[in-house]
Amino acid sequence: MIKISPITCYLFFIFTLAGCTQDQQNQLSRKVVELLDGNYRVTYANGPTEKSWVVKNGKVTTSEKGYYYFWDEHKHYVQVPVENTFIEEIDN
């Protein structure tokens, strides 16, 4: 059995990502967010409008319709457009 070190996996990921277009990188980033449960801050910013939500121990998913879907920390269901929306992982 061949053992692959974490550093090798990381380098493979970096080199693969470098060969992707910006759109492919964005799609991959969205897919990673879909797969991981965690704590996130989701911010929608469009001109003077800015709104943020916190997702605790949950996940943010997307569809081909161009929206992110998630349950915020207050158990409210939220749907925001992918465009102008930023997702960052937070501690706790």
Image (cartoon, rainbow, N blue to C red):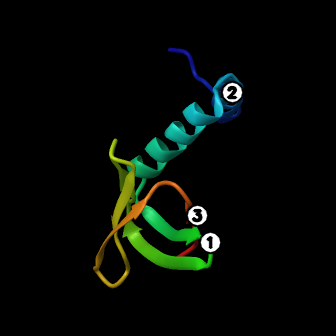
Between residues 78 and 45, which one lies in front from this camera angle? 45
| Secondary structure under the numbered disc 1 in the rendered image | loop
In this view, 47 is above or below 28: below
Observer-side mark, 2 or 3, equals 3
| Furthest-bottom residue in this view | 74
Q: How many residues crowd around disc 2 within 10 Å: few (fewer than 14), some, or many (20 or more)?
A: few
Q: Are marks 3 and 1 in contact (CB under 8 Å)?
A: no
Q: Residue at x 50, y 14 (%)?
A: 1
Please give the residue where the numbered disc 1 appears in the rendered image: 47
Indicate the position of residue 62 as horizontal and vertical percent values.
37, 50
The amino acid on which the numbered mark 1 sits, given as a three-letter code, is Gly
Label 1 – label 2 distance at C-alpha: 42 Å
Q: Earlier in the sequence, mark 3 or mark 1?
A: 1
Tell me where residue 78 sits by quadrant: bottom left
The amino acid on which the numbered mark 3 sits, given as a three-letter code, is Glu
Please give the residue where the numbered disc 3 appears in the rendered image: 88
Label 2 – label 3 distance at C-alpha: 25 Å
| Furthest-top residue in this view | 1
Indicate the position of residue 58 as horizontal and vertical percent values.
36, 65
Q: Earlier in the sequence, mark 2 or mark 3?
A: 2
| Secondary structure under the numbered disc 2 in the rendered image | helix
Please give the residue where the numbered disc 2 appears in the rendered image: 8
Q: Is residue 49 left or right of residue 8?
A: left
